[in-house]
Amino acid sequence: MTLACASAVLVAAISGRALAQSARRGGYLPLVADFFGDQDTAAAAQANVQIVGSFADGFREPELTTALERVAAQHAPIGIVCGTGFEDRPQLLTQLARRWRLYGNGPDLVAKVKDPEFLASVCRRCDIPFPDISLQPPGRGDYLAKRRGGSGGAHIAPASANDYREGIYYQARVPGRPVSALLVANGAGAIVLGLSRQWASPTSRQPFRYGGAMRPADIPSRVAGRLETATCRLAAALSLTGLNAVDFLVDGEDFFVIEINPRPGATLDIFEPGGVGTGVGSLFSLHMAGCAGDLLDEAPPLDGARASAVCYAARGVTTPDRFEWPEWSADRPNAGIAIRADEPLCTVHADAATAAEAKALLDQRMAWIDMWMQGSNTPP
């Protein structure tokens, strides 16, 4: 099944910018509802509405539905693509799927994938290492407390015997560096689009908060091959569709699957091939094709290296009325937006010949944003 270009598609996510830009590159007309309404989201979207509420509190059905109905009113969308923000709300996906065709994993599958006991059982059947888990505070051992359906790392903290809450589970802490596999699947099979190295941007209260990612992951090819095999085996076992990500911890030759994110996620920017207007070479178009049952024979080629990171506000800041955001920035807030300390300010990108060079350039640009927040007018 091939979907026609120039079709309007709803996009719902905490931040819809990356999906909107990829949809536009693929020839679709994105209709976006998200919590930020950033400048570059509005530029990419055919229509966009900022959802009433706080991204920290997540989606609520009345505000989300109202926003989606507004952007859909004049455009007859063929369906909806849901990004980050629904992992812990499969019931909301169910309500959306009753109204629009859902391009992505269904609510029942999302609920299963984010159930740690279910995922552990699938990994065992596939002979893939997965850390021990407990639904009660562990009496001994080194464990992390995680919120079921959480994303972005902010929900993860060292476990303690006193932190049991509804929806929390405990996963044994295992050694290794975070590596994520981005895949596209069609319900029966999958291909890995690439592996990325990830890192945290910790705070005292959120030691595992997502920081950024770079590709290539710079791990030995034999280890990369094993991660790709495990990723495709899990995708087939779970009947995943569209874009998804499998997160690993890699320690030398050893690895563990940590979780699966059953939706388009944080590494879209660094793997976007940049196709123009034909539906070929856009991650969004690959997602739509996978949901329709089609799958590429191999991943699109990617040149050089790319890194991307979330720049969090070091202190409270109000975005100025006249500010020319650097071309290497994204998720650019509108003028006059009050951003509190530790909230996302923008996203920063860097391209280079190697991953190390891309990361070094990224760090320089992040430092410039930090200086600007402290009052420097030095140009980037």
Image (spheres, rainbow, N blue to C red):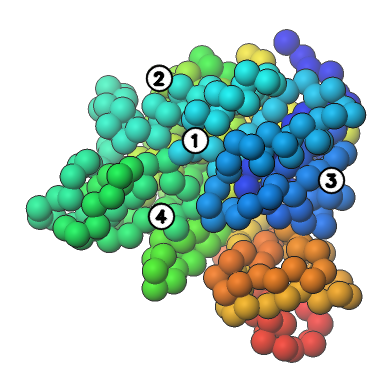
Please name the amino acid that badge 4 sits on.
Answer: His
Where disc 3 sits, the SS reads helix
Image position, residue 94 (x, y; %): 55, 23
Whichever of callouts 1 and 4 sits on the residue coming sooner in the sequence is 1
Residue at 82% in and 57% down: 39
Depth order, front residue of 76/51: 51
Image position, residue 122 (x, y; %): 31, 25
Q: Quadrant of residue 45?
A: top right
Where disc 1 sits, the SS reads loop
Q: Which residue is mark 4?
A: 155
Please name the amino acid that badge 3 sits on.
Answer: Ala
Q: Which residue is mark 3?
A: 44
Mark 3 neighbour density, 10 Å: few (under 14) some (14–19) many (20 or more): many
Q: Which residue is mark 2?
A: 237
Image-based side of 238 in relation to 50, left or right: left
Q: Nearer the viewer, mark 3 or mark 1?
A: 1
Q: Looking at the image, do the residues carrying marks 3 and 4 touch, with CB atoms under 8 Å apart?
A: no
Whichever of callouts 3 and 1 sits on the residue coming sooner in the sequence is 3
Q: Nearer the viewer, mark 3 or mark 4?
A: 4
Whichever of callouts 1 and 2 sits on the residue coming sooner in the sequence is 1
Q: Which residue is mark 1?
A: 89
Residue at 51% in and 14% down: 188
Residue at 79% in and 50% down: 41
Q: As displayed, is residue 253 above or below residue 378?
A: above
Q: Which mark is residue 161?
A: none
Q: As displayed, is residue 58 above or below residue 125?
A: below
Mark 4 neighbour density, 10 Å: few (under 14) some (14–19) many (20 or more): some
Where disc 2 sits, the SS reads helix
